[in-house]
Amino acid sequence: MLTIQNVHKTIDKKSILTAISFTQKPGEIIGLVGRNGVGKSTLLRCIAGSYQLDDGQVLIDQTDVAVQPEMRTQLFYLDEAHLFFKGNQLLQIGRYYAQAYPDFDTDQLTDLLAMYHLDGHQRYQQMSKGMQGLFNIILAVCSHARYLLLDEPFDGLDVIVRKNIIRLLLDHVGQTQTAVLITSHNLVELDQLIDRTLILKETKIIKDYQLEQLRQTDRKLQIVLKTNTIPALFKEAGRVLSVSGRVMVVYFPNYSDELAAQIQAYEPVLCESLPITLEDLFEANLVTEEDYQVFI
Ligand SMILES: Nc1ncnc2c1ncn2[C@@H]1O[C@H](COP(=O)(O)OP(=O)(O)OP(=O)(O)O)[C@@H](O)[C@H]1O
């Protein structure tokens, strides 16, 4: 179990993370989402030990990694901003990682390179961004670290590479019970991968959703009313995601029979459930009043 306990981080006198606490079980895939610049990468760097914590602890199975730094080999984090191996060939990079990660699987690296048609003798910096992204995930998988911290793994990749990455990660997690903490603005891809999402806003985790559970308690409704006035109830009990004439899409957290009856009292011409996506959760939690005016 990975435990993040009361983590605080200030950079240049600006508070970036405050009292961040959560636990992650083996085999759990968590999506860390939030608006640009909120502190997602900073949190991954704090967990990985690239940044010193101002307060708090990162524990693996109750052991503080600051007290036993060798525990960090159970955490894989590849910081795109500080890649030391850019000039090296892929197999050479694999050999560096095999020294750092005691369970690194070199045979699996050879197999995965062949499976994804990557040439082990090619230099990393000569590969396209998409192929580099795929190789980064292959490295993460082959490390056999128990916790993978992945920062924007889909950034700039074409749809085929994104699908390959999702398949590779899901297979790996299914076989090994590795836990993955992943940041991404590609909410469609993230949605296919994760069981749980943490929403970061103004230095704190404001929501921790188990997605399956949430899909049972919340509703996203497409409602067509007889007039195009938005009832106050929709804004009080939910979040209006879009309006097009008399057709509105509204997200209602904690949907209840009572709320359903209140909606029916408006005698809607149509009222139907739509699937809840990660994008809806992002909008429902992170769109500000200002953005809201622009949207509708
Ligand atoms: N090394 C650093 N020096 C100065 N400021 C930093 C440093 N690292 C992060 N920050 C600041 O911390 C804040 C959070 O940055 P971070 O990269 O963690 O955000 P993010 O949520 O990952 O953003 P994005 O979604 O845009 O990638 C930003 O204001 C950023 O400028």
Image: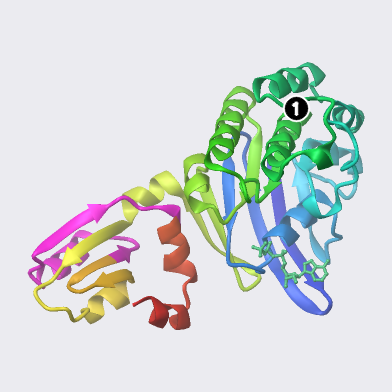
Which x, y percent locates residue 223? 19, 65
Q: Does the magenta stretch include residue 232?
A: no
Is residue 272 within the magenta segment?
yes
Q: In which quarter of the image is the C terminus?
A: bottom left
238 vs 131, left or right, is left
Q: In which quarter of the image is ligand 1?
A: bottom right
Question: Tag 1's secondary structure?
Answer: helix
What is the x, y in percent for residue 139? 76, 33
Task: Determine whether, in the image, residue 268 is placed left or right of residue 232.
Answer: left
Q: Relative to 168, is 12 on the left or the right? A: right
Residue receiving disc 1: 142
Residue 119 or 179: which is nearer the viewer? 119
- Give me the residue at 76% from left, 23% from top: 109
Three-letter code for the amino acid on which mark 1 is drawn = Cys
First to last magenta residue range: 250-278
Here the colouring is rainbow
Q: Is residue 45 above or below residue 147?
A: below
Residue 168: x and y in percent read 60, 29
Which is nearer the eye, 215 or 287?
287
